Amino acid sequence: MSNRGFTLVEVVVALVVVQVGVLAALSTTFVAARTLRHATELERAVHVAEWLTDSLPSAPGADSLVGPGFRARWAYGSGGTTITVTSGATRLRVAPVPDGSS
């Protein structure tokens, strides 16, 4: 009897090792996609917050729809103005924004 080829045990072990590697790669891909989506939302919110500093509604605490899917609210505080921008489930709070009087 000659020793040609692989045994069934060797093939099964090799398939398990390959499967673990593929699952790890897929998991990493899904985590990266979720992180990228969250970072994109935060980047959009930061740009809107920067734009808002010059174009907030005149009444503190008033909600303002400032773009597709974005709401903004501001309020006075002891250290300046607090701006909260919400986009879906993501909320960015910039606190405080100096009022320029110091």
Image (spheres, grey):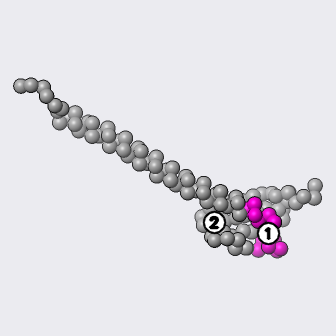
**In this orientation, which residue lies closer to the viewer: 100 or 50?**
50
Identify residue for label 2: 87
Residue 67 falls inside the magenta stretch: no
Q: Horizontal and vertical percent for residue 11? A: 22, 37
Measuring 61% from the left and 60% from the top, which residue is drawn there? 41
Count of numbered tags? 2
* Label 2 to label 1: alpha-carbon separation: 18 Å
Q: Is residue 72 left or right of residue 20?
A: right
The mark nearer the N terminus, 2 or 1, is 1
Label 2 residue SS: strand
Place residue 4 in its image quadrant.
Answer: top left
Q: Is residue 18 left or right of residue 82?
A: left
Is mark 2 in CB contact (under 8 Å) with mark 1? no
Measuring 60% from the left and 67% from the top, which residue is drawn there? 88
Q: Is residue 91 left or right of residue 96?
A: left
Q: Is 8 rendered above or below residue 62?
A: above
> Most extreme residue toward the left, as rendered?
1
**In this orientation, which residue lies closer to the viewer: 9 or 18?**
18
Range of residues picked out in magenta: 49-62
Measuring 71% from the left and 63% from the top, which residue is drawn there? 48
Q: Horizontal and vertical percent for residue 95? A: 78, 57
Q: Is residue 2 left or right of residue 16?
A: left
Label 1 residue SS: helix
Image quarter in which the C terminus is found? bottom right
Looking at the rendered structure, the kind of residue marked 1 is Ser
Identify residue for label 1: 55
Would you say residue 81 is visible in this rendering? yes
> Most extreme residue toward the top, as rendered?
2
Measuring 70% from the left and 60% from the top, which residue is drawn there? 47
Looking at the rendered structure, the kind of residue marked 2 is Ser
